[in-house]
């Protein structure tokens, strides 16, 4: 059952990409940017704010270093375990579910990113974009159902 | 506005625009720091009154100087670095958290024309920057060499990345309707409709966004990373003094960012709905900043309200809500929005 679904999925995907590739040249939604002529000056304030944020964080830690006391002793520097003596290694083996979640995140987040340019140009392209995107979401849904059936979302 | 004042003094060209930019950054910085300080006070007061207590009352009248006292205190507290910690990463983690949270604010317009970086992909920029906060969490959780922070960091990372998918998908409907990622243009697009707020056609998207925003900022009822009854403080349990304060600050700035995206994308930003302006035309004289702050603080209040009302989710419930409910809802919302937009 699943293997049939996968085959359908692959065929539908190839169909989507082929039609998209054939038709993409007929759609002009963005003005071309000449290479070399475009300097993104509008990003400069964002860069400055990031620099200010990093500087603020570092400077406030530095200023705190001038005032604060430093009286370390062995017990104080042990990892906090509610006052009990430390048992075992902290960086122990952990559940494989976290890996699966991270992999699912990569798959679904990339697919979400594909939706953004479509959403912006949907009004200009019309029916073609609508059909293609519903196909895309159906393919996504097949993968989603597959992950669900394989119990990738299950946490016990 | 600031540019015209500067050029009237006689400083023009590149130097003038740079000075105006630095003044703007200073204004945003000051406003955000003030917001963070008094958001903590506001939270303690709101939760106090909901629990029939008074909240902080000692420092100043009605405890109004409490945030100042807390801020000064954090400078004097000892900075304990646990013996087994990976020192470089341990020290970098709070800086990364604050960096990621504050960086988002560069593209948030506070009212018409006041935005630091008016870039055409504002929303995408916010997604990119707010994803960086996961690095702060991972670094803090891993480097502390403590079981509580390790488990807290793992849980928190899995939670943040899971809900990021739902968060990203919930705003696609807004993108379809406004055909822009620039936050100013999204607000202007809402003014073309009678309702003036995308929360009405996009109620499903707004619902998914709100829940994902709560999870994304690690706030109750999704505050599992810092579930104090089991993990004490989660990924920042080993931090103290100023570094702890920085994590705290990053959390409150994150709430401000999420509230402002919600206000700008779903509630019309600094504008009022046209149907209200038709009934009360005199309200148009009120500056946009007032409405923006009013809506922001309403959201912030909802954060506190929900924190004091709902019990914490169990971890498996949290993950299944994100993956099995919110993502399908967001996808359905996208399909419905596209169909309605095409056929209406």
Image (cartoon, coloured by chain):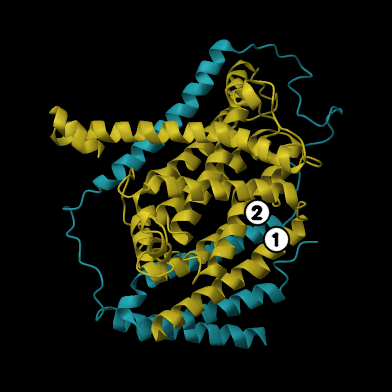
Chain colours: A cyan, B yellow
In the rendered image of this protein, does residue B27 appear above or below residue A70? below
In the rendered image of this protein, does residue A97 appear above or below residue A152? above
User: Residue B298 location, x and y as percent?
Assistant: 56, 49
In the rendered image of this protein, does residue B159 appear above or below residue A13? above
Task: Answer yes or no: is residue B52 visible.
Answer: yes
Of the pair B195 and B204, the residue shown nearer to us: B195
User: Residue B48 location, x and y as percent?
Assistant: 72, 37
Where does label 2 land, which residue?
Answer: B159
Residue A82 lies in what quarter of the image?
top right
User: Residue B188 location, x and y as percent?
Assistant: 34, 61
Task: Answer yes or no: is residue B93 visible.
Answer: no
Which label number is shown at residue A114?
Answer: none
Cβ atoms at labels 1 and 2 below 8 Å apart: yes
Position of B225 with respect to A108 (left or right) is right
Where does label 1 land, which residue?
Answer: B319
Label 2: how many Cα within 10 Å (few below 14, some 14–19, many 20+): many
Query: Badge 1 sits on which subunit?
Result: B
In the rendered image of this protein, does residue A54 appear above or below residue A104? above
Question: Disc 1 to disc 2, how far (Cα)?
Answer: 7 Å
Query: Badge 2 sits on which subunit?
Result: B
């Amino acid at each position: 059952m699943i293997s049939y679904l996968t085959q359908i999925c692959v065929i539908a995907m190839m169909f989507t990409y082929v039609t998209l590739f054939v038709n993409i040249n007929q759609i002009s939604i963005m003005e071309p940017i000449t290479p070399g002529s475009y300097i993104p000056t509008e990003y400069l304030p964002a860069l400055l704010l990031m620099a200010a944020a990093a500087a603020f964080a570092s400077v406030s830690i530095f200023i705190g270093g001038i005032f604060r006391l430093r009286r370390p002793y062995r017990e104080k520097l042990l990892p906090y375990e509610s006052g009990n003596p430390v048992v075992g290694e902290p960086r122990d083996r952990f559940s494989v579910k976290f890996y699966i979640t991270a992999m699912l995140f990569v798959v679904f987040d990339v697919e979400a990113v594909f939706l953004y340019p479509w959403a912006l140009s949907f009004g200009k392209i019309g029916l073609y974009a609508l059909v293609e995107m519903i196909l895309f979401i159906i393919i996504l849904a097949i993968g989603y159902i597959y992950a669900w059936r394989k119990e990738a979302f299950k946490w016990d | 506005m600031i540019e015209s004042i500067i050029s009237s003094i006689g400083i023009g060209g590149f130097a003038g625009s740079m000075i105006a930019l630095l003044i703007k950054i200073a204004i945003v910085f000051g406003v955000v720091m003030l917001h963070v300080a008094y958001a903590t006070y506001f939270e303690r007061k709101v939760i106090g009154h909901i629990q029939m207590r008074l909240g902080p009352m000692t420092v100043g009248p009605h405890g109004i100087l409490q945030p100042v006292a807390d801020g000064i205190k954090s400078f004097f507290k000892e900075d304990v670095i646990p013996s087994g910690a990976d020192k470089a990463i341990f020290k970098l983690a709070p800086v990364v958290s604050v960096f990621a949270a504050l960086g988002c604010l560069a593209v948030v317009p506070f009212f018409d024309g006041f935005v630091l970086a008016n870039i055409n992909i504002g929303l995408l920029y916010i997604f990119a920057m707010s994803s960086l906060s996961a690095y702060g969490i991972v670094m803090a959780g891993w480097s502390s060499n403590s079981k509580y922070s390790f488990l807290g960091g793992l849980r928190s990372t899995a939670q943040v990345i899971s809900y990021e998918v739902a968060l990203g998908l919930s705003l696609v409907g807004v993108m379809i309707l406004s055909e822009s990622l620039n936050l100013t243009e999204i607000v202007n697009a809402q003014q073309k409709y009678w309702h003036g707020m995308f929360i009405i056609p996009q109620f499903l998207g707004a619902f998914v966004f709100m829940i994902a925003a709560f999870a994304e900022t690690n706030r109750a009822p999704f505050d599992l990373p810092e579930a104090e009854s089991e993990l004490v403080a989660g990924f920042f349990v080993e931090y103290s003094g100023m570094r702890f304060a920085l994590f705290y600050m990053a959390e409150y700035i994150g709430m401000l960012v999420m509230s402002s995206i919600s206000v700008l994308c779903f509630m019309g930003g600094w504008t009022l709905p046209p149907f209200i302006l038709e009934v009360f035309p005199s309200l148009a004289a009120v500056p946009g900043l007032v409405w923006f702050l009013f809506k922001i603080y309403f959201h912030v209040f909802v954060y506190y309200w929900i924190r004091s009302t709902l019990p914490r989710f169990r971890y498996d419930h949290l993950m299944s809500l994100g993956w099995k409910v919110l993502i399908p809802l967001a996808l359905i919302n996208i399909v419905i929005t596209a169909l309605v937009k095409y056929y209406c």
